[in-house]
Amino acid sequence: MPPFPDRLQAGSSYPLGATFDGLGINFAVFSANAHRIELCLFDPAGRREITRLALPEYTDEIWHGYLPGARPGLIYGYRAHGPYEPQHGHRFNPHKLLLDPYARRLTGEIRRSDAIFGYRVNSPRYDLSFDRRDSAPAVAKGVVVAEDFNWGDDRPPKVPWSDTVIYEAHLKGLTIQRSELRPRERGTFAALADQGVIDHLRRLGVTAVELMPVHAFVQDQHLLEKGLRNYWGYNTLGFFAIEPRYLSDGTAEDMRIAVRRLHAAGLEVILDVVYNHTAEGNEFGPTLSFRGLDNANYYRLLPDNPRHYINDTGTGNTVNLSHPRVLQMVMDSLRYWVTSFHVDGFRFDLGTILGREGYGFDAGSGFFDAVRQDPVLSRVKLISEPWDPGPGGYQLGQHPPGFAEWNDRFRDSVRRFWRGDEGQRSDFAARLAGSADLFGHRGRRPYASINYVASHDGFTLLDTVSYAEKHNEANGEDNNDGHSENLSANWGTEGPSIDPATREIRTRLQCAMLATVFLAQGTPMLLAGDEFGRTQNGNNNAYAQDNETSWIDWTMADSDEGRLLTDFVARVIALRHEHPILRCAAFLHGKDQPAPNVLDIAWFDEQGEVISAEAWDNPAERTMVLRRAAAAADGSVPILTCFFNPTPEDQSFRLPAPQLPTTVLIDSADPAAMERALEGDIVPVKARSVVLTRSVYVK
């Protein structure tokens, strides 16, 4: 390692982060309240601090300096000098090594040590005390990288929203138990790029993989003390760095290669990102980066008591997106993943937080406005989780145009309907039609509704039909965590059952709910493993289960039941791709008539009669027929009709007029059945199942 100079050159305030220009490295970091910031350089092992150099310039609240002759691979961190006045919102402590918020790569892990806290742990003055121990041996450091990956002819698939089918997966859990992969590749981006994984995704017919957080994150101390680990990763430390455990060779090329291979297969990559809070927690949390650089600006603090944090996230702190430099950091991070890693979109955890200003949620907040006008970000898929635990935090349907939203009302309605609850038919119909009551404004389209029946947060699909209660004892919280109401039922036995009748009902309901997701207007999302009956043994909050509870068991895919369910899912998704009316890009309102006496959308009862207003209001009525039609390019009018029977008895439905030759495309009660011609105008629909038929009107 060459000797370093005694002082840094002036450098530039832009770009932020550590940037190699071929001749040296420019360092730039934001802090409006620091008095001085030092750059700390380490030996190649990251263990020994070699030198400290003050950033010599301060321009527009950016501290910056230039180190000539430095090369990628340099390990570094910062120390910030300034007031330690928690009562005024300031928590500067130069004894704490701070990670660059723009660090592109991390080395080392956060180790259990009282030295990582800015205050003296166990002091009677709590966080008002001041700790003078050096935290460098116990914290992660940044590594300067060179961005020189050859993308060749990679092109984003740019799948239209109306054609999109999302597969939500945890990167590690998806492949950690695939025995055919090399051990060091399992659970990493290298495994995601494996042809066997890609073949499975293509066979299903999904078009996008939505990965749970892959940003570098911190393990929670209280979990480690219980012998658990943060599995989900919603505890971000670095918004520009990949979690090191997800890289088989330690370099970001692992992820880039995976994205390139997925793109070559026509698959998009969407990242679940966490910009609402950081891993530093509340006032009693560690000082790792943002808190030590400028606590009063990076976080929202209580105006009348800035010692404490606004906790709209429920995690201890809330990132202050109202500050322009913090907003810039988030925007720079998003653009980085698009331009440097070619990702195709983002799902924003606790998305309501990103729209919060000082007065509450605003669909015209600085963040939403910045993203919507950005020439890079406005062209990728944007999905919000439209709620947070704070006041007024539930904002489903209230996000601005350009954003899709997770629709938990779809999930809840589908679960209630197929559980057999009374009074669900009207709401179920609204969800099938794309939730126009929620999204039909400001020119938004049906695909703004992300339709799902299970996600990482809650029961898997199999558990939804196998457990009446949550079973989260393994989380070490006395089963008090996670939602208590899951709108689930066990159908006779809590948990696994060997009873053939119980197993048959569960399989039938899984098929019915999966069919509902893919036959509804909107953007369908499938939880990884639900296509072959994955279980978490009743745990509906497996955030700390980095083990077989959460990892996908691929042997289930090879079981008879697993193959049956997987084949059924692939068939329904294929039908969705084949028939445009099943993925219509516009809301249908029953006003257009593509064929004589055939509206674009209509609802019927078992007798083939249009459901009356009185019947809609009858809570005892549960069965329903949904018919959709649209003219094809050749002038014909395909008519797709869904017959829903959530009751415990078989039902006979009359095909609504006009009477045309009709084909049964799927029957969820007989998932292996092939297409067949319907004889007559009576459609038999077994208990707790859905049937899809196709007719064609030809002029």
Image (spheres, rainbow, N blue to C red):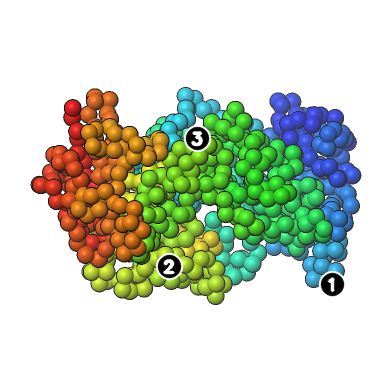
Separation of disc 1 and disc 3 at Cα? Answer: 57 Å
Q: In this view, does 663 lie to the left or right of 215?
A: left
What residue lies at 18% left-to-right and 47% top-to-bottom? 655
Q: Quadrant of residue 695?
A: top left
Q: Kindly identify which numbered label has been placed on residue 443.
A: 3
Picture coordinates of residue 164, whole percent (x, y): 41, 38
Q: In this view, does 15 lie above or below 464?
A: above
Asked if the residues shown at circle 1 and circle 2 are in contact, with their CB atoms under 8 angstroms apart, the answer is no
Q: Earlier in the sequence, mark 2 or mark 3?
A: 3
Tell me the crowding category of disc 3: few under 14, some 14 to 19, or many 20 or more residues within 10 angstroms, Cα based: few
Secondary structure at badge 1 equals: loop
The answer for how far apart the CA atoms under marks 1 and 2 are is: 42 Å
Q: How far from the left and from the top, in percent, is residue 67?
A: 80, 32
Q: Nearer the viewer, mark 2 or mark 3?
A: 3
**Residue at the farthest front position:** 614
621 to 322, vertically: above or below: below
Query: What x and y, as percent, mark residue 51?
Result: 83, 43
The three-letter code of the residue at mark 2 reads Gly
Give the amino acid at mark 1. Pro
Q: Residue 124 carries which label?
A: 1
Instruction: Sort mark 2 into few (<14), some (14-19) or many (20+) by Cα contacts within 10 Å.
Output: many
Residue 600 shows in the view:
yes
- The residue under label 2 is 538
Q: Residue at x 39, y 49 (%)?
A: 430
**Which residue corresponds to the image point at 86% horizontal and 55% vertical from the top-left?**
88
The image quadrant where one finds the N terminus is top right
Secondary structure, mark 3, is loop
Along the polypeptide, which appears first: circle 1 or circle 2? 1
Give SS at disc 2.
loop
Label 1: few (<14), some or many (≥20) within 10 Å?
few
Between disc 1 and disc 3, the foreground one is 3
